[in-house]
Image (tube, rainbow, N blue to C red):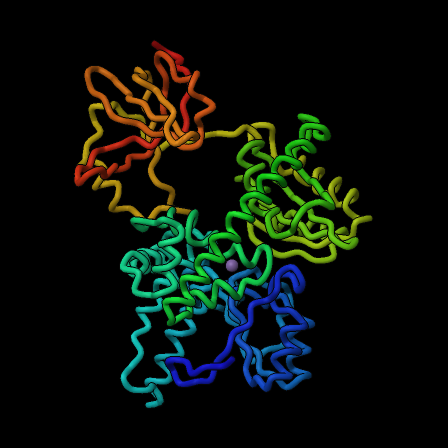
């Protein structure tokens, strides 16, 4: 169903069915495009390693432009152009653009070429209004939020907050989002847009973002929301199963976690791998086995470059791709054991025992009396916070805990007191640690503002705590 783009071209989109076609530029997609008369194919966030697909596109008479931010291999796909900040000779200064960031730069360049050629349609397109989508994609792609990325996200968040795009408005409604931040996008909006793709067809998310009719947008947003709930349920089941395997099978001396299971859904293993990394602080690969083929998702820790590790173990893999902290692979079942051993021995060389200790870094140790609204405002000028630009984390030692209680079933609320000063605190998702909140403790926290009935109060969002060691 092609339509006319703002620059005047007839366009359509294709989202790979991840479960059928895997990630990226799939052969079936190229064939389909050729059949329906497409002349030019532009990839976004994929394609840089699609050598055979590039060849196929050329054979079928399709022009291909690859835009991507993944690491290029030694040879590039056959294409009219490959646009990727990591290409040798690419002079673009900011290598860490997201997939959508690269696509947006292409839009900027295209607009300027069209203007110079006198081909820009009137009234002129204001491409700033695309920044809400750019922010969304940049946050969801988990690139570091500094440099150009931070600027794109900062401008885009304002648009997301205004919710001028119908689909975004509906998405905010079903996700119960009141105010916007990079965290809200990452934890509430992006998972809902992605939920359909993890289980079925990611095109639902695109349809929502493009929708112009209220009724349709409402329906799509609600569908995505229910996919998301389903995804969460599957995820917690897979996590449970993975934990059982970790506890049964892994000795303490093991530097890595590699688990494979036929019950798993390849759409959720990445998220579960992230959870295992949080819990065990080991480079982790989870492999979902389906029809005799393994599809793996990997997450890493500081000091261990996952893509390099996969390159090192390439002989045991059918395919792989990714970055320093996240990567994916495909593997034959009979190779899983040898891969796992090679991966572990590489990690033994790369990582020391100290690398494997979970460490919490904080930015400053403070006293409760130093915390006020002015400090919050100063810190907040550094936002948006997210990957690569974490929200400043403070440590306050030896605070006295008052009135700890469970709120909303899963969370803890209490007051922290020190030298006559006190601040309200909230700790999310740790209701099971209520009993540890006695006497004097050290707390790690971010500064937040709690708005309630038009009153704004400083609130400490406690990320972790431990019994105080000095007194
Ligand atoms: Mn990407």
Q: 37 above or below 264?
A: below
Q: Is residue 48 visible?
A: no
Q: How many numbered circles are shown?
A: 0
- Residue 236 in picture, x, y percent from top left: 58, 39
Pick the residue in front: 152 or 355. Answer: 152
Residue at coordinates 42% horizontally, 53% vertically from top-left? 189
Q: 131 above or below 273?
A: below
- Residue 205 in picture, x, y percent from top left: 48, 62
Residue at coordinates 58% horizontally, 82% vertically from top-left? 63
Residue at coordinates 44% horizontally, 62% vertically from top-left? 219
Q: In the current view of this chain or complex, which residue is farthest to the right?
A: 334
Pick the residue in front: 159 or 316. Answer: 159
Q: In the current view of this chain or complex, which residue is farthest to the bottom?
A: 118
Q: Is residue 289 left or right of residue 407?
A: right
Q: Is residue 313 visible?
A: yes
> Which image quadrant for residue 363?
top left
Pick the residue in front: 137 or 201. Answer: 201
Q: Is residue 30 left or right of residue 465?
A: right
Q: 410 above or below 435?
A: below
Q: In the current view of this chain or complex, which residue is farthest to the top?
A: 471
Quadrant occupied by the C terminus = top left
Residue at coordinates 40% horizontally, 29% vertically from top-left? 411
> Which image quadrant for residue 339?
top right
- Residue 89 in picture, x, y percent from top left: 50, 68
- Residue 29 in picture, x, y percent from top left: 63, 73
């Amino acid at each position: 169903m092609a339509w006319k783009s703002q620059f005047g071209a007839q366009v359509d989109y294709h989202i790979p069915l991840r479960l059928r076609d895997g990630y990226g530029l799939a052969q079936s997609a190229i064939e389909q495009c050729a059949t329906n008369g497409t002349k030019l194919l532009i990839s976004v966030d994929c394609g840089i390693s699609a050598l055979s697909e590039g060849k196929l596109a050329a054979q079928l008479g399709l022009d291909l432009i690859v835009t991507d931010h993944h690491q290029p291999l030694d040879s590039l796909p056959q294409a009219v152009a490959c646009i990727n900040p990591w290409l040798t000779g690419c002079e673009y200064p900011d290598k860490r653009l997201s997939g959508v960031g690269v696509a947006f730069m292409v839009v900027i360049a295209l607009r300027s070429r069209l203007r110079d050629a006198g081909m820009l349609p009137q009234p002129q397109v204001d491409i700033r209004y695309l920044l809400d989508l750019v922010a969304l994609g940049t946050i969801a792609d988990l690139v570091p939020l500094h440099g150009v990325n931070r600027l794109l996200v900062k401008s885009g968040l304002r648009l997301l907050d205004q919710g001028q795009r119908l689909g975004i408005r509906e998405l905010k409604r079903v996700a119960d989002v009141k105010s916007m931040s990079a965290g809200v996008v990452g934890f509430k909006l992006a998972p809902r847009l992605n939920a359909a793709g993890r289980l079925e067809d990611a095109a639902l998310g695109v349809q929502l973002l493009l929708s112009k009719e209220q009724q349709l947008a409402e329906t799509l947003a609600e569908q995505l929301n229910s996919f998301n709930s389903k995804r969460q349920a599957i995820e917690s089941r897979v996590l449970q199963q993975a934990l059982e395997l970790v506890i049964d099978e892994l000795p303490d001396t093991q530097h890595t976690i590699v688990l494979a299971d036929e019950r798993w859904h390849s759409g959720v293993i990445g998220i579960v791998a992230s959870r295992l990394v949080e819990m065990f602080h080991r480079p982790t690969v989870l492999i979902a086995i389906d029809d005799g083929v393994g599809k793996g998702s990997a997450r890493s820790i500081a000091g261990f470059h996952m893509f390099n590790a996969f390159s090192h173990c390439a002989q045991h893999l059918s395919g792989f791709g990714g970055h320093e902290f996240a990567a994916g692979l495909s593997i034959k079942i009979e190779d899983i054991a040898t891969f796992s051993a090679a991966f572990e021995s590489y990690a033994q060389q790369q990582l020391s025992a100290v690398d494997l200790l979970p460490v919490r870094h904080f930015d400053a140790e403070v006293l409760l009396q130093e915390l006020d609204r002015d400090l919050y405002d100063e810190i907040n000028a550094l936002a948006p916070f997210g990957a690569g630009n974490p929200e400043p984390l403070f440590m306050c030692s030896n605070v006295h805990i008052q009135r700890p209680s469970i709120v909303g079933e899963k969370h803890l609320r209490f007051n922290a007191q020190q030298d006559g000063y006190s601040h309200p605190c909230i700790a999310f998702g740790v209701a099971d640690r209520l009993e540890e909140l006695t006497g004097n403790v050290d707390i790690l926290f971010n500064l937040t503002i709690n708005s309630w009935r038009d009153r704004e109060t400083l609130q400490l969002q406690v990320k972790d705590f431990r019994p105080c060691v000095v007194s």
